[in-house]
Amino acid sequence: MSAASQPAFDVVVFGATSFVGRLLCEYLVAQFGVEGKGEGAGALRWAAAARSNAKLQALRSALGPAAHGLPVLIANAADPASLRAICAQARVVVSTVGPYALHGEPLVQACAESGTDYCDLSGEVQWIRRMIERHEPAARASGARIVHCCGFDSIPSDLGVHFLQQRARERFGAPCTRIAMRVRALRGGISGGTAASLLNVVREAAADPQLRRELADPYSLCPPATAPRPRQPRVSGARFDPDSGGWIAPFVMSAINTRVVLRSQALLGDAYGAGFTYEEAVSTGRGLRGRLAATGLSAGLAGFMLVGALAPTRRMLERFVLPAPGEGPTPEAQRRGCFDLRFFGTTADGRVLRTQVTGDRDPGYGSTAKMLGQAAACLALDVGSRADAPGPAAAGPAARTGGFWTPASLFDERLVERLRAHAGLSFDVLERP
């Protein structure tokens, strides 16, 4: 690409005035300023985009003097021409406009057709599958790299597995063919956007038996030719866990995280081993207290799904219980939040490796904004030329041409290092249980 045809911006944040969009802009101002002068994370030229100029001006004012020169762009998810216009000015577009199943496809289509790289924080597995089916041919042809799930779902899980497998190869000369992730600690709130996305998945599934079957398939995001497909474990209720030595319960995010990890395995040419299995659960502790907590958490999750599936009770949740769109945890709640994930890996011959991924902010917002920001920066600044390798069907992270990727299959160690250095995440090997 000639200097004259270079995009004006490395990154454009679409949905900058949303709850997570504002957090992302705050983080980008702190990390990169607004003139492409990075603080050790690399220079980044970026702009904020949304449908309301008044809200964009208010956002720029709220970001303080450091954001005085922040470029703002007007674009609307319902106006394809405006989306194409921001794609023409961006190397990467990062979207925070959800629920993605309701508002996200026009931007994915615009990026796929224009050759503009894209990332988001979607965890809506049914929508992601539709985007792959509908737009991967265009992305392959144009060279656009599309990366969903660049927030708490599913960067810690996907890169956590990648990190463990890299250490397993170094230590054992072979990957772990079985990995179990356990949520050791999780403290944070929920925003109206996340609540709306979750309820939309439940609503769609309640009305569509085919979608319910799809959501039960752990390989639903894998390329059709992926083989072999070993039976994947699933934690569906309270049970004792030999890995952690305590009781566990289902983890609400496992429905998307496991599918992203299995897609990474497929895109990397079965790099985790032909019989690889992966599962996630929440650790609730030992003894009677742990058992009661696991039983209560399992029942609560099942009850939420049931209530969300029925239109009258779903409306009551939306009106009286869950936050409205644009609302979310306070800044203090975000600072008090954290997460601690433990990964238990076992090789085919029984050797064991344990690792840990932690974050220093509330997972869904404080940490997610930092993860999404560094994913966008990694996509814009670190990932190699689209022309230097074949597309994502090829094995190995060197394949960087157009298509639909996962964080681990495209970013690999480069994003791990960014997250360690600039986003408050740690990736560590645990020598003791």
Image: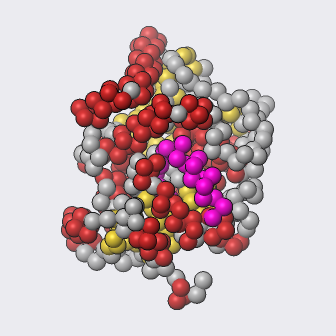
Q: The N terminus appears in which quarter of the rendering?
A: bottom right
| Res 402 → quadrant | bottom right
State left or right for residue 373 relative to residue 412: left
Residue at the spot x=67%, y=68% of the render? 141
Residue at the spot x=29%, y=35% of the render? 318
Residue at the spot x=53%, y=33% of the render? 208
Indicate the position of residue 196 as horizontal and vertical percent values. Answer: 36, 41
Front one among 278 and 14: 14
Q: How is the image coloured?
A: secondary structure
Residue at the spot x=70%, y=51% of the render? 267
| Res 229 → quadrant | top right
Is 70 included in the stretch rendered in magenta? Answer: no
Residue furthest toward the top? 288
Indicate the position of residue 404 as horizontal and vertical percent values. Answer: 61, 57
Indicate the position of residue 79 as horizontal and vertical percent values. Answer: 40, 66
Front one among 372 and 123: 123
Indicate the position of residue 175 as horizontal and vertical percent values. Answer: 73, 42
Residue 195 in sight from this viewpoint: yes
Q: Against 10, is 158 above or below?
A: above
State left or right for residue 408 relative to residue 370: right
Q: Against 162, is 352 above or below?
A: above
Residue 384 in sight from this viewpoint: no
Is 132 included in the stretch rendered in magenta? Answer: yes
Q: Against 203, is 65 above or below?
A: below
Residues shaded magenta: 119-138
Q: How many marks?
A: 0
Q: The C terminus appears in which quarter of the rendering?
A: top right
- State the predominant SS element of the stretch in magenta: helix
State left or right for residue 138 relative to residue 98: right
